[in-house]
Image: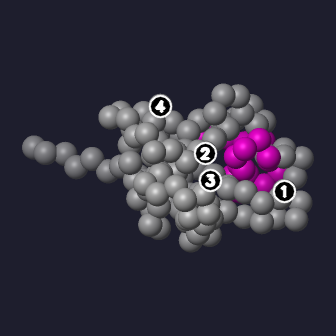
């Protein structure tokens, strides 16, 4: 009997998609994808995510498309990013950047756990 395998993909909000598309257009990076990965270390003893624009997709990478943006994730990072929602926010206190909200990352010690973790080292545990 065949068993159906359900793979949760990564979702970009319209704001995140627009931010990535704007960067790709501004830098004239045709054919590039948004690579999302688990970076070393992490905020608050949790998982820290990194992002890069990449045109080198390897055979072991997983490729998704969300809101018109190609997203690439390596075979290790996908375990943390399955079902993740990526947003782009502009907050007067935290600044501007991408926000990764994933159900598979370790629990954050934030005052508001449902806010996820901003990547790029901009995470503040003293919200």
Q: Nearer the viewer, mark 1 or mark 3?
A: 1
| Above or below, comparing residue 101 to residue 15 in the picture | above
| x then y, percent, for residue 104 | 55, 43
| x then y, percent, for residue 65 | 41, 59
| x then y, percent, for residue 69 | 47, 61
Secondary structure found at label 4: loop
What residue sits right under mark 3 in the picture?
A: 101
Is residue 90 shown in magenta? no
Q: Which residues are magenta?
A: 105-122
What residue sits right under mark 2 in the picture?
A: 51
Q: Quadrant of residue 51?
A: top right
Secondary structure found at label 3: strand
Of pointers 4 and 1, the one earlier in the residue sequence: 4
* Residue at x 77%, y 41% (from the top left corner): 121
Query: Callout 4: few (<14), some (14-19), or many (20+) C-alpha neighbours within 10 Å?
Result: few
Q: Nearer the viewer, mark 3 or mark 4?
A: 4
54 or 47, which lies in front?
Answer: 54
Is residue 116 shown in magenta? yes
Q: Give the CA separation, mark 1 to mark 2.
A: 18 Å
Does the rendering let one see residue 16?
A: no
Q: Could you tell me if the residues under marks 3 and 4 are in contact, i.e. CB atoms within 8 Å? A: no
What residue sits right under mark 4 in the picture?
A: 76
Q: Give the CA separation, mark 3 to mark 4.
A: 17 Å
Of pointers 3 and 4, the one earlier in the residue sequence: 4
Q: Give the CA separation, mark 4 to mark 2.
A: 15 Å
117 or 32, which lies in front?
Answer: 32
């Amino acid at each position: 009997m065949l068993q159906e395998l359900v793979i949760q993909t990564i979702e970009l909000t319209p704001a995140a998609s627009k931010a990535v598309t704007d960067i790709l257009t501004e830098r004239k990076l045709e054919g590039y994808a948004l690579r999302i990965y688990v970076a070393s270390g992490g905020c608050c003893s949790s998982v820290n995510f990194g992002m890069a624009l990449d045109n080198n997709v390897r055979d072991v990478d997983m490729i998704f498309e969300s809101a018109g943006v190609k997203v690439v994730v390596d075979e290790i990072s996908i375990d943390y990013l399955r079902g993740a929602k990526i947003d782009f926010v502009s907050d007067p206190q935290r600044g501007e950047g991408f926000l990764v909200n994933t159900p598979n990352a370790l629990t954050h010690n934030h005052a508001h756990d449902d806010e996820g973790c901003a990547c790029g080292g901009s995470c503040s545990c003293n919200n």
